[in-house]
Amino acid sequence: MFEFEKLINSRLETQREAGLVRQRLTLSSKQGRTIDIDGNSYLNFSSNDYLGLATFAPNLSKLDQVGFGSGGSHLISGHHDYHSQLENKLAEFVERDSVLTFSSGYMANIGILQSLAQKGDLIIADKLNHASIIDGAKHSKAELVRYPHCDLEALMRRLERHLKSQSANKWVVTDSVFSMDGDLAPLDEIASLCKKYNANLIVDDAHGFGVLGKFGRGACEYFKLSQKDCPVLMSTLGKALGGYGAFVSGSKTLTNYLMQFARSYIYTTAMPAMIAQANLANLNKLKAGDNLRSKLSENIRYFQTQCEKMKVKHARIDSPIQKIELFDLQSLQRKNTELKKQRILVGSIRPPTSSTPRLRITLSASHSFSDIAQLVRNL
């Protein structure tokens, strides 16, 4: 036991010396525009609750009938009628044939890549993809190659290089909106390359669903991509929807395949039915949320205008995710501490989570202009 403690303490010390120790913040309030931590109230610019829907308390009128736990996996006894209703309503909303819900976006990406990409296949992935995509590729037995972030020329070269290779199937996988940079992948051009080089496109739309497109259906609506253009689409329910979980949408053949072969779906307890019911309630709010998306867009523009007015260097990206890059970890920690003293909470992101130290600011429809002006003054 002593050797075990010595081993993990040594690794922790290395992390501390590098200034990379992670710590949790414990909330004593619900998620929202402001949150309470350790007896203090903070303006919250660190949440992925882009439309402010996480603050709502759905009327779970049938909780006494549904109960709390699901009691088993989807394929044993844990699949409730509310799960089926949620899947059907999501498929209808995103205008795709079928949906399969997962407990989280991480588990969905693991399941997609582990089951679809087989030995002899090739995965071609953007270098700044989410960690769940990287881990999903590692869980598969396929070869993995990566291309520089959103570099279409590099992607084309990799596809050309493997055009006549022995790879049985080629899978191009990318985020739609990148979680640490906030920029948008050129999915229309990526889809065209996939068609030209006979590759299958997998898109993680975690930060696009509910935000992108006229009706908030996500990246495929925004880029006018059909199900054939993007056969595998993963979206999450814990960001713009303000709920919990994730779903994969595509053909009925795809969702049936994942049900049979995705280990992260088969071998885990199902999302509680009460959570599926709450997600359904928030989906109705999302569908009627044109005013929320308009307010979010106004807040993004206002943030950029204020940054330019105050001479704050920012990324100039039209996304709820805004990054302020800093030179080193010490500058990041100092700035983050200063903001906390002013009761403002932002994401403090360090390598390897991001390529550079940065403040990750997330804007929401729930923020007021005065909230944003206060943030920028302190930046």
Image: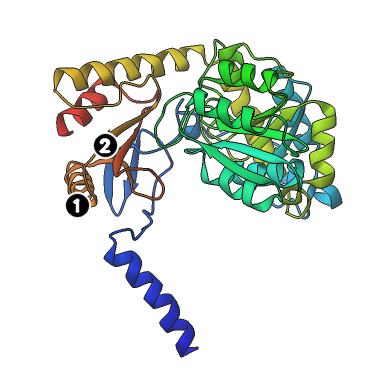
Which residue is rendered at x = 47% and y = 27% of the image? 150
Say which mark, if any, is on residue 325: 2
* Residue 303 as seen in the image, left or right of residue 171: left
SS at circle 1: helix
Image location of residue 275, percent across then percent down = 65, 41
**Mark 2 or 1, nearer chain start:** 2
> Dividing the image into 4 quarters, which one contains the C terminus?
top left
Q: Is residue 119 left or right of residue 324?
A: right
Q: Could you say which is closer to the camera, residue 314 or residue 288?
A: 314
Residue sitting at the far bottom: 2
Image location of residue 345, percent across then percent down: 29, 41
Say which quarter of the image contains residue 235: top right
Residue 311 x/y as whole percent: 14, 23
Which label is found at residue 330? 1
How busy is the neighbourhood of tag 1: few (under 14 within 10 Å), some, or many (20 plus)? few
Task: Tell me the amino acid under the disc marked 1.
Answer: Gln
Q: How is the image coloured?
A: rainbow
Q: Is residue 139 above or below residue 176?
A: below
Spatial CA span between label 2 and label 1: 13 Å
Q: In this image, 188 relative to 376: left or right?
A: right
Check residue 80 in the rendering and tell me which mark sits there, or answer none: none
Label 2 CA crowd tier, 10 Å (few <14, some 14–19, many 20+): some
Q: Nearer the viewer, residue 50 or 172?
A: 172
Tell me the SS state at disc 2. strand
Amino acid carrying mark 2 in the image? Glu
Q: Nearer the viewer, residue 21 or 134?
A: 134
Residue 237 position by quadrant: top right
Would you say 94 lies left or right of 35 here? right
Residue 342 visible at all: yes
Q: Pinpoint residue 325: horizontal percent, then vertical percent.
A: 26, 37
Image vertical order of residue 156 relative to residue 65, above or below = above
